Every structure is written in C-alpha cells, then in structure tokens.
Amino acid sequence: MENLISELKQRIIEALSLEEVKPEDIDSNAPLFGDGLGLDSIDALELIVVLEKYYGIKLNDAAQSKAIFKNVATMAEYISKNRTK
C-alpha cells in the first residue's frame, strides 16, 4: 500500500502541475480539498482522469468521487480494491 500511496502522490503532483510540491510534502491523511492540499473542482476532474488513465477506474457518481477523494490514503485504498490496470 505504501508503494501505491507514493506513486499516487507523484501522479497527483504531475497531473496538477504542483511544481513546488514533493511527494513527502503531501500528508496521506490530510484533506485534498479545502484546508489540506487546497484542490478545487477542476483538480477533481484531473484526478478522475488519473484514476482512469493509470488504474482503469471510471467514476460516474459525484457523491462517490467526493468520498474517494477525501485524502490520498482513501484514494489508494479505493484503487487497490478496484483497479483494472
């Protein structure tokens, strides 16, 4: 799971062009939206693309997406259970 979390942090940084952020700067349990990393709805769309492109996961339910994108740890847990790539 730690490898997946590290990989996911790197993919988030690349997808969102967070050039000044390093993977170790992202707390796996900190919120991605609002107070934590401070992402917005456009960033959420980019995260959906990351899940589909790298892990073969399609998200269609906005409520489900909100729960999955709570933090990096919840994303990694969801990916580990649902990935097709």
Image (cartoon, rainbow, N blue to C red):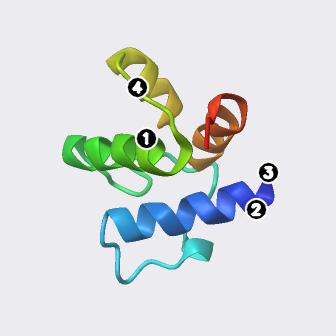
Identify the element where label 3 is drawn: loop
Q: Residue at x 36, y 16 (%)?
A: 61
Of tags 2 and 1, the one toward the viewer is 1
Circles 1, 4 touching at the beta carbon (< 8 Å): yes
Please, is residue 2 above or below residue 71 in the view?
below
Of tags 1 and 4, the one toward the viewer is 1
Mark 1 surroundings within 10 Å by alpha-carbon count, few (fewer than 14), some (14 through 19), many (20 or more): some
Distance of mark 1 from mark 4, alpha carbons?
8 Å
Q: Quadrant of the C terminus?
A: top right
Q: Residue at x 31, y 51 (%)?
A: 39
Residue 34 in view, yes or no:
no
Closer to the N terminus: mark 2 or mark 1? 2
Q: Position of residue 31 (x, y in %)?
A: 49, 45
Identify the element where label 1 is drawn: helix
Q: Amino acid at mark 4?
A: Leu
User: What mark, if any, has residue 3 been given in the picture?
Assistant: 2
User: What mark, if any, has residue 59 been given in the picture?
Assistant: 4
Q: Amino acid at mark 3?
A: Met
Mark 4 surroundings within 10 Å by alpha-carbon count, few (fewer than 14), some (14 through 19), many (20 or more): some
Q: Amino acid at mark 2?
A: Asn
Provide the residue designation for mark 1.
52
Closer to the N terminus: mark 3 or mark 1? 3
Distance of mark 3 from mark 1, alpha carbons?
19 Å
Closer to the N terminus: mark 4 or mark 2? 2
